[in-house]
Image: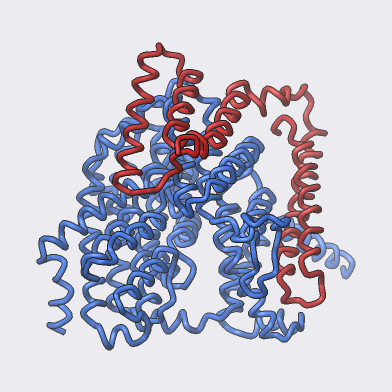
Chain colours: A red, B blue
Amino acid sequence: MHPGELVFSACLLAFSVWAFWQSYAISGLESLFGPGVFPMLASAVMILSGLAILARALKERRLQSDDPEPVLPYLFPLRLITFVPLMVAFAAAMPWIGFFPSAALFILASIAFLWRRNLVWTLAVTAISVVAIYVIFRLVFQVVLPSGVLWS
Amino acid sequence: MMEAFGFLAISFSDPYLLFLTAVGTLAGIYVGAVPGLSVTMAASILISFTFSWGVNEALALIAGVYVGGVYGGSRTAILLNIPGAPSAIATALDGYPLAKKGLAGEAIGLSTVMSVMGGLIGVIALAIAAPAISDLALMFNSRDYLLLGLIGILLVGTLSGESFAKGAFCGALGVLIGMIGLDPMTAQARFTFGSINLMGGVPYVVAMIGFFGVGEALYQLDLVGKARIKQKVSRIIPSWRDVKKYLQIGLRASGIGTIIGALPGTGGDIAALLAYDDAKRATKNPEIPFGEGAKEGLIAPEAANNAAVGGAFIPMLTLGIPGDAVTAIIIGALFIHGLQPGPLLLVNTPHLFWFIVGNLALANLFLLIFGLTGIKVFTKIVECPRAILIPLIVILSALGAFAIQNNPIHIYWTLAFGIVGYFLKKFGFQVGPIILGVILGPMMDANYRRAMIGARGDVSDFLLNFVMNPISLVLSVGLVLLLLSQTPLLGWVRGIAAGKGDKTV
């Protein structure tokens, strides 16, 4: 049993019920080949399997004798709650400062946080990575990437 | 007949075509291997590069990328446990455990040899049995495609993960994600919540990159700084004893791969999963249990997904129906070059058909050469510390998500899918069924509705059709058996039967 599984299973079930309701809202049951019928079937499968998952989690909870592992450190370790905002900041900054500057800053910040070597190494690895990505994707594959509205 | 051999040999005798096929195959291996880069993406980009070229040159390059790419996904599946492509999902199940045991080199060597064998069998099937197999595929109707989709998703749900319920949940969730956007039949908006960005739907590559790229990267954050198991890649060329021992499994999987590949809409991904499942059932006493590094579990999906390449060309060239996403793009390339894929292609342009057969065979030979060499360079990626690799995976994922439609919003979606994937993984869910659901969902929806319209909306007629047609009956029985074997239903049925039995006594 994973820490927090009971709450997570309940959330999944709630989401499934909401999804079924949304599927029903598409075309109702006026015809059996309407656009909402297959989504309703899929969300019905989610509700059924969600119930099975919840039932199993409840059963395992009852059988569990020792204290469960604390939920928060298991689900939200420090590395995750630092890295995810960095990721989002990269995506948010990209249209403004351009793909490569934003990628360079993201790589620099995350390697500095995760690797913890000296600055020269971190800078060198960042530079090599960005140049390699530029050569492969911009020059060879010719992917057009945002250059940043701030500079134009 | 002699004429056909002449066309077959074109790509072997022209140095420029040889070169293009070689470059395509090598590039394909890396494209397939890098998570976030897909063969579909590379093929569509290449078509825009090559439309001013001759048709043979363009096809040589794209066929090379296709063959190399289907194989390349297995490299990262074995070394990093990240399938580079959906067709390598099953490869990771036993390939990665093998690598963890220090047998990465052997695993790669064996998967290369079996991939090439599968690939060549697929090509031979394309050359010999094309008309016969396409006749069979013609007899499939919408019900059967719906059943195939259901079986595919449920199979991947049963193959891995903690429980069948979790697999079924993920498959259904994937189907729902695949429904997002405007309904192709009625243009009715589904789950768009008024957003224009959602109307075009979620490209499955975005979901795939999110769940497999970003989700895996986040999951691996826990492992940063932990000593990595050095993937020892010593011997790559597999022993003759191993090749001989697993030849039968490889041949069986190649057969499955060719047939599944020939069915329209089902490509290497389903072929690999079905072959894996078949190998699991057929191997009574594996040396190592499946999921812990069984070589049978590595060989079957690899032989099958490469065999599916040749198979996928069969309906594409004879019926004009693509076998999978890449052949759909190749159809586009043929149209650009003024050719009409369909029943008349073989009659009007036999040289093109035989050229493709010869070229696919050539690409497989190059695959053998590149697959068994260059792995040392490749494994440098693995020796790279996770602290560097994880940010790079995120950047590549963002790049791949963006490049599909040059839409920055897809980067956010990829990150969001990644975060959802992280939590699902933390609770023992597998993301494979989600991806399969996203890919197959729209196909299943369309076929469900066609079958229902065929039954004039009458539920009893609709259900009756599943048992009245011999092909549908076989598939329905397969689906029911799969459900019975995986859920408590069988127990209940037995319980009820036993209860009745007691009463009568």
The relative height of residue A90 versus residue B84 in the rendered view (above or below) is above
Identify which residue is drawn at 39% across, 75% down.
B316
Residue nearest the observer in this picture, A150 or B492: A150
Residue nearest the observer in this picture, B176 or B161: B176
Q: Report whether residue B403 is seen.
A: yes
Q: Quadrant of residue A76?
A: top right
| Position of residue B352 measured from the top left corner of the image (x, y, whole percent) | 24, 77
- Left or right position of A49 against B82: right
Q: Quadrant of residue B439?
A: bottom right
Identify which residue is drawn at 77% across, 52% down.
A16
Identify which residue is drawn at 41% across, 58% down.
B40
| Position of residue B111 measured from the top left corner of the image (x, y, whole percent) | 33, 49
Quadrant of the image for the N terminus of chain B?
A: bottom left
Residue nearest the observer in this picture, B403 or A37: B403
| Position of residue B314 measured from the top left corner of the image (x, y, whole percent) | 36, 75
The relative height of residue B437 versus residue B384 in the rendered view (above or below) is below
- Left or right position of B117 against B83: left
The relative height of residue A117 versus residue B388 in the rendered view (above or below) is above
Q: Report whether residue B303 is seen.
A: no
Looking at this view, name the residue that lies furthest to the top: A118
Looking at this view, name the residue that lies furthest to the front: A152
- Left or right position of A20 against B360: right
Identify which residue is drawn at 44% across, 64% down.
B325
| Position of residue B52 measured from the top left corner of the image (x, y, whole percent) | 25, 66
Residue nearest the observer in this picture, B1 or B354: B354
